[in-house]
Image: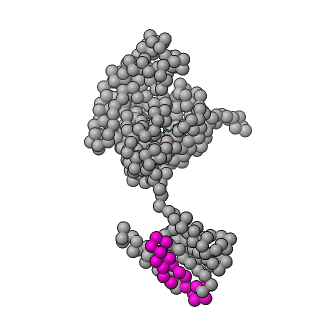
Amino acid sequence: MSAFAGVAEKAGYELVVPPMFEDLGVFLRIGESTDVVTKEMYDFEDKAGRRVALRPEHTAGVCRAFVQHRPLLPWKVWYAGSNFRYEKPQAGRFRQFDQVGVEALGSSDPLLDVEVVALAADFYASLGLRDVSLVVNSLGDAADRESYVGALREYFTARVGELSEESRANIERNPLRILDSKREADAAAISDAPSMTAHLGAEARDHFAAFTAGLRALGVAHTVDDRLVRGLDYYVRTTFEFRSTALDASQNAVGGGGRYDGLVENLGGPPTPGIGFALGVDRILLACDAEGVFPADPPVVEVFVVDVTGGQEALALTRELREAGWGCDRAFDARSMKSQMKSADRSGARLAVIVGPDEVTSGTVVLRNLVDSGQETVSRAELVSRLGAIRQRETEQR
Ligand code: AMP
């Protein structure tokens, strides 16, 4: 999360923390023919009989907050948190899962689409992931999409005999979903299905051309897949998905997003374009594991206090060092020197401050470097300034 915050905040996105649950109506705006809404939502009545739901995603809640509070535009925000979907749990698919993401409201400039997509790509790269590919498409404007949906409905109706039962049920409800089917039975019919490209209006086509040109200008590798549709119904124009080639096809989507220019209006706000993405944290961790690039945070504990006088000295020293800005820990239960040194090693600290009865008498401590095992005796009163000098030297050496 801190890695994501770093990338997002450098690009001018501020943190937003939408509520974990909302009025059910907010999520119904995601689209009533979306599985996420119809089948996967954890909705219930509260004690006053209100229908509420645990959030299945963040975008609707962020747009609701925008409509309610009307921050200045453009409003660029990032978030991190759990979502809940009543799905069949399997590898990489959970009923509670975490996402990080951004939303940018208030501009339909295709260069904003480029910024948003590049930001996600930069985040994967910052983790050291190499096997992540980007697929992009345009779903056109609302009218283009409607004409495409009509063409798909006609096409799939003609080939209904070749479809799985689930996809047959989608012909009337939402034929775009059929394109997303991973079922083998549907593969042949999908591969001959009409393409979105032919249904794009001039404006959507220009927008998409400017978007892909921007990606090329930044060197963000991508492929265009004119059958890419995503699980949420509110997308128009730009849609995109990031896939990890290190993961199995059934769970290889590590993030995705798109434009949702009509969503704010749908939630009762003024017409406000928007674009965003959500990246699946659980899947990203799986991908890091598969690629062997586990980003280890630097150890937070820098100094470990080893007190063999019973523990009172450590009580005062840890407080003093924490106040001086050091990550500092200690052991409890008056354990032996050997056992405390083991804990010091395990803590990841690079320095140990050791106090025994002799040091208490002489008003000193032993400062031990746990990396090279060098040590020195330092006056207790000068400990903080001695540590400060060590930190300064380390910073200069970096
Ligand atoms: P979506 O919100 O459906 O656009 O999904 C965005 C990303 O969230 C996906 O690419 C996945 O990485 C992740 N994701 C979605 N659903 C799940 C789930 N049930 N379990 C784990 N990750 C998920």
Q: Residue reaching furthest front?
A: 338
Instruction: Residue 248: give x, y in percent of width and height.
Output: 46, 35
Instruction: Residue 181: give x, y in percent of width and height.
Output: 48, 25
Q: Quadrant of residue 244?
A: top left
Left or right for 117, reference 377: left
Q: Which residues are magenta?
A: 359-377
Give the tally of numbered discs: 0
Quadrant including the C terminus? bottom left
Residue 71 showing in the rendered view? no
Question: Residue at point 36% right, 71% down?
Answer: 396
Instruction: Residue 363: give x, y in percent of width and height.
Output: 57, 87
Question: Residue at point 37% right, 45% down?
Answer: 130
Q: Considering only vertical position in the picture, is 31 above or below 338?
A: above
Instruction: Residue 27: give x, y in percent of width and height.
Output: 56, 34
Q: How is the image coloured?
A: one colour
Question: Residue at point 47% right, 22% down?
Answer: 184
Is 375 within the magenta? yes
Q: Quadrant of residue 305?
A: bottom right
Residue 349 showing in the rendered view? yes
Left or right for 61, reference 388: right
Question: Residue at point 33% right, 21% down?
Answer: 198
Is 63 within the magenta? no
Q: Considering only vertical position in the picture, is 85 above or below 171?
A: below
Q: Residue reaching furthest right?
A: 47
Say which of 9 and 379 sits in front. Answer: 379
